[in-house]
Image (spheres, grey):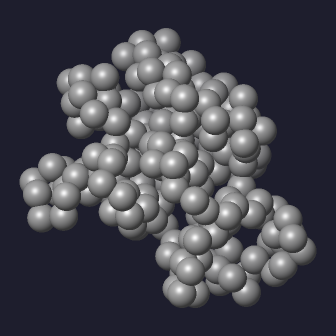
Amino acid sequence: MKLYYAPGACSLAPHIVMNEMDLPCEREKVDLGTHKTEGGKDFMAINPKGYVPALVLDNGVLLTEVAAIVQYLGDQKATGIVAPAGTITRYQQMEWLSFIATEIHKQLGPFFRPNLPADTREQQMALLKRRFDYLVSHIKGPFIGGNEFSVADAYLFTVLNWTRFLKFDMGAWPALTAYMERVQSRPAVKKTLAEEGLA
């Protein structure tokens, strides 16, 4: 397998999952500005969507989108990072992955645009505040699904970590800050951040 990633982007989530599971996998960095890989390849020829993550399997099949990739990885080894297929816990994890993708990831994305209009910024912030409140009310244990770290935590940590780069004031959500610190203290997460030059 080979994971195409950009440091700190949403591809950090599958990278964390790989390290949590100790899965052997090549990794190649992508410059999202030029769409060139570290090895000089045209990334658009690998993933026509033009963004990371992209996971190329040993048989040449391409997987994209965080939620699909982390579940695929989680199914490669019985480590407990993803619940067994067909269980209610698996569907709850899928529910969280969908919520993170659509309600946190996609709502944070516009803040990376330097020309974001002030009124749009204000609307996005109001929406994110409601989403953060929802997260706080539903994190009932050390992790999003309770006591066990899962693929959903790898994804949630990744996107919440963007609030640091964006210099958001997270003072209203100390539980989210504590959650991020718990996840970041995991050896596999520390290793991943170091590998991506983010430590």
Instruction: Reply above or below: 52 against 40.
Output: above
Q: Position of residue 99 (x, y in %)?
A: 32, 51
Instruction: Reply above or below: 137 against 87.
Output: above
- Quadrant placement of the C terminus: top right
> Would residue 99 be seen by someone viewing this image from the given angle?
no
Horizontal arrangement in the rendering, residue 15 relative to residue 134 (left or right):
right
- Disc count in the image? 0
Q: Position of residue 133 (x, y in %)?
A: 31, 27
Horizontal arrangement in the rendering, residue 198 relative to residue 158 (left or right):
right
> Would residue 151 be seen by someone viewing this image from the given angle?
yes
Picture quadrant where residue 28 is located: bottom right
Residue nearest the observer in this picture, 36 or 39 = 39
- Quadrant placement of the N terminus: bottom right
Horizontal arrangement in the rendering, residue 26 relative to residue 42 (left or right):
left
Q: Position of residue 14 (x, y in %)?
A: 52, 54
Residue under the point 48% across and 43% down? 20
Horizontal arrangement in the rendering, residue 66 relative to residue 99 (left or right):
right
Residue under the point 73% across and 81% down? 44
Residue under the point 73% across and 44% down? 196
Residue nearest the observer in this picture, 34 or 61 = 61
Which residue is situated farthest in the right direction here? Answer: 40
Q: Position of residue 145 (x, y in %)?
A: 24, 37
Residue under the point 45% across and 21% down? 182
Instruction: Reply above or below: 67 against 96.
Output: below
